[in-house]
Amino acid sequence: MTDTIFALSSGRPPAAIAVVRVSGPNARAAGEALAGTLPPPRIAGLRRLRDVEGGTLDQALTLFFPGTATATGEDLLELHLHGGRAVVAAVEAALASQVGLRRAEPGEFTRRALINGRLDLAQAEGLADLLEAETDMQRRAALAMAEGGMSRTIIDWLDRLSMAAARVEAELDFGDEDEVTQATGLDLPPLLAPVILEMAAMLTRPPVERLRDGVMVVLAGPRNAGKSSLFNALLGRPAAIVTDIAGTTRDVLEAGVIRAGLPYRLVDTAGLTNQTADPIEAIGITRAKAQLDVADLILWLGEPDAAPANALKIGARGDELEHDRVSVDHVTSVHDQASIDALWAIISQRSQQLIGDLASGALHARHRSLLSEALSALQAVDGHDLLLDAEHLRIANRALAAILGRDATEAMLDALFGRFCLGK
């Protein structure tokens, strides 16, 4: 029999209200032991909670939800207590003293929801992201995932692929019978083409790591081009040392900032030059070039013709230098806040193109790997060798099912649910 678990599900006391949840087969009995009688299912009732000796623990709103239509898929009890530390501790002690009850492990409530089919693994990952969200962009993407946006799409694909696989199996088993051949009418590539296009479109979604770590904006260019000054202006604080001496910045300097709900990682780099006798500066240049390779967006402050591909060409120090406004994308001056605000608007627009539509959520690295595996398998289906096509369809189905956690390993589940708090 499944254990009955309990935990504080609201914030750490003291607080105005503290919610203690109890889930499992003994949830009703646990509530009756504390409150005497419980209110009707799904109706809140004020009850006096007592310990085993009859002493009053608290007056609390008490709700009971019979399984399986609950958050965990099991009988679920909620006790809405006064949120003092002593009150919560006393009620938890009374629950712990009951036979068959134990404190929940981190994430165990959500893990039971997964096991009991109340949500799938992708939704659970979205819920974990939602608990950790620090920006509005992260919240929106996590909420879309937690509410099943991607899961519904995956389920639709699985249904369509299962139908295709069934037709292939029928053709393999009974292909010599004219009636079956006419019924299946196999022409697999056109049949799978819409699913392949939809999968490819999903793979263009932003990685959740970009929303969590931030869009990486690298400032690059030759020595003394004004990179560090612009870096400070974009941050709104003096994070980098600025002097008139060429080569002041010799290492990578990184700082985070949040703008309009989206996190950014701004990276200041050493001035790029083809020749240097300084071994420390040479190391800085190597590191600067490495940052260019991984940047989401490059702000190039050098000669426009030397700019890396797709870099945003910046005419820095616009109050001191004349720039060909045709060859640069934007002219800035650290003494002109309007020019810095305008640059942020351009960065935001470029970043929004990278982020894309968050209505259905962002992809974890695990999702991206499995989805790529499924897409490759479907792209290999050519309709010429049905045995091979059947295997490719099985590979695609397994990969898609894994996104929903239908064959998730215990190790993966432990890693996921360890991110949750006790009462979740």
Image: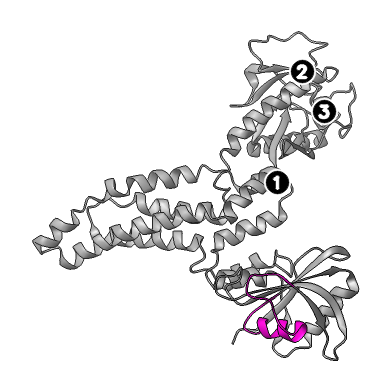
Q: What's the residue type where badge 1 is placed?
A: Asp
Report the span colored magenta: 22-45
Circles 2 and 1: CB atoms closer than 8 Å:
no
**Disc 1 residue crowd, few under 14, some 14–19, many 20+, Cα 10 Å:** few
- For disc 2, the marked residue is 332
Q: Nearer the viewer, residue 233 or 144?
A: 144
Circles 3 and 1: CB atoms closer than 8 Å:
no
For the point 40% across and 51% down, which residue is it?
376
Quadrant that contains the N terminus? bottom right
How far from the left and from the top, in percent, is residue 90?
86, 79
For the point 82% across and 20% down, which residue is it?
337
Residue 228: mark in rendering: 3
Residue 91: mark in rendering: none
Q: Is residue 282 visible?
A: yes
Residue 213: mark in rendering: 1
Q: Dividing the picture into quarters, in which one does residue 172 lie? A: bottom left
What whole-number distance in Å separates the C-alpha atoms at marks 2 and 1? 27 Å
**Disc 3 residue crowd, few under 14, some 14–19, many 20+, Cα 10 Å:** many
Q: What's the residue type where badge 2 is placed?
A: Thr
What whole-number distance in Å separates the C-alpha atoms at marks 2 and 3? 13 Å
